Image (cartoon, rainbow, N blue to C red):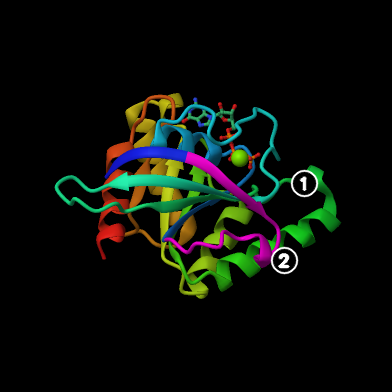
Amino acid sequence: VIITQGKYLASAVKPEQYPEIHRKEIVFIGRSNVGKSSLINSLTRVNQLARVSSQPGKTQTINFYEIGAKIDDDPGRKDFYLVDLPGYGYAKTGAQRRKIWSRFINEYLLGSEDLQFVCQLIDSRHEPMASDVEMFHWLVEHNLPVLVIATKVDKLSKNAVAKNISQIKRSLGVPELDVLPYSSVKNVGREELLNVIADCLLE
Ligand code: GTP
Ligand code: MG
């Protein structure tokens, strides 16, 4: 895929606020601070497209980004949406907040007809948290295709990345799972993810 542009389109907490024009959607989910918004910026190469913060809990709404795309020799445009979600497992937002979070996220994840696959981001530096494992199983149970992405691999040695990715697979209970190593700082995994997206845009 050649990304020709990326722009913020809409924020939503209920279906009436979803974009009116339907396009294929690729969604990013993961704990607060895992690097969802940074990944969207690195993938699109549009600086500050998604707001990044070192403080967890930055993204609070379902954010739709309209991505202009072309596929190499294909003359037609293959525009799609990247969808950034608020992080889960962030205690500070409080129980009430968490309840609302899960309601509007579930509504989106289970209701969208345009959702192609869910990128679940897990921090490569640590063992997956209980919330990561729960989320993965919830997605699988609801028949949502999941691509697990191990983030921030620039912070680890190659050996440590391999070791921790094996641990992620074990924790999720799927030893044969494909996990994509990613670094938004070094653009590791970018081409691979764009290839996965290209396949789904061509379908
Ligand atoms: P919420 O919106 O709070 O759910 O967080 P998020 O998942 O969108 O994380 P965000 O992209 O805002 O990044 C959180 C912090 O991690 C920021 O300080 C980023 O600079 C840092 N970060 C994100 N990706 C990477 C990466 O690949 N490598 C390194 N070294 N730091 C990263
Ligand atoms: Mg964010």
Q: Mark 2 points at which residue?
A: 103
Left or right: 138 with respect to 185? right
Quarter of the picture containing the N terminus is top left
Question: Residue pushed farthest left?
Answer: 73
User: Residue at 52% across / 74% down in the picture?
Assistant: 142
Residue 129 sits inside the magenta stretch:
no
Give ligand 2's quarter of the image.
top right
Residue 182, can we see it? no
Whether the residue carrying mark 1 lies under 8 Å from ligand 1 is answered with no
Q: In this view, does 127 lie above or below 21?
A: above
**What amino acid is found at the position of numbered circle 1 in the picture?**
Ala
Mark 1, Cα crowd under 10 Å, few <14 / some 14-19 / many 20+, is few
Mark toward the viewer: 2 or 1: 2
**What amino acid is found at the position of numbered circle 2 in the picture?**
Arg
Pick whichever, 148 or 163, lies toward us: 148
> Which stretch appears magenta?
7-23
Quarter of the picture containing the C terminus is bottom left
Q: Position of residue 79 (x, y in %)?
A: 37, 52
Kindly identify which numbered label has been placed on residue 91. 1
Q: Position of residue 166 (x, y in %)?
A: 38, 47
Left or right: 199 with respect to 148? left
Between disc 2 and disc 1, whose residue precedes? Answer: 1
Left or right: 4 with respect to 105? left
Q: Position of residue 194 (x, y in %)?
A: 31, 45
Measured Cα–Cα span from mark 2 to mark 1: 16 Å
Residue 8 sits inside the magenta stretch:
yes
Pick whichever, 37 or 125, lies toward us: 37
Pick whichever, 68 or 113, lies toward us: 68
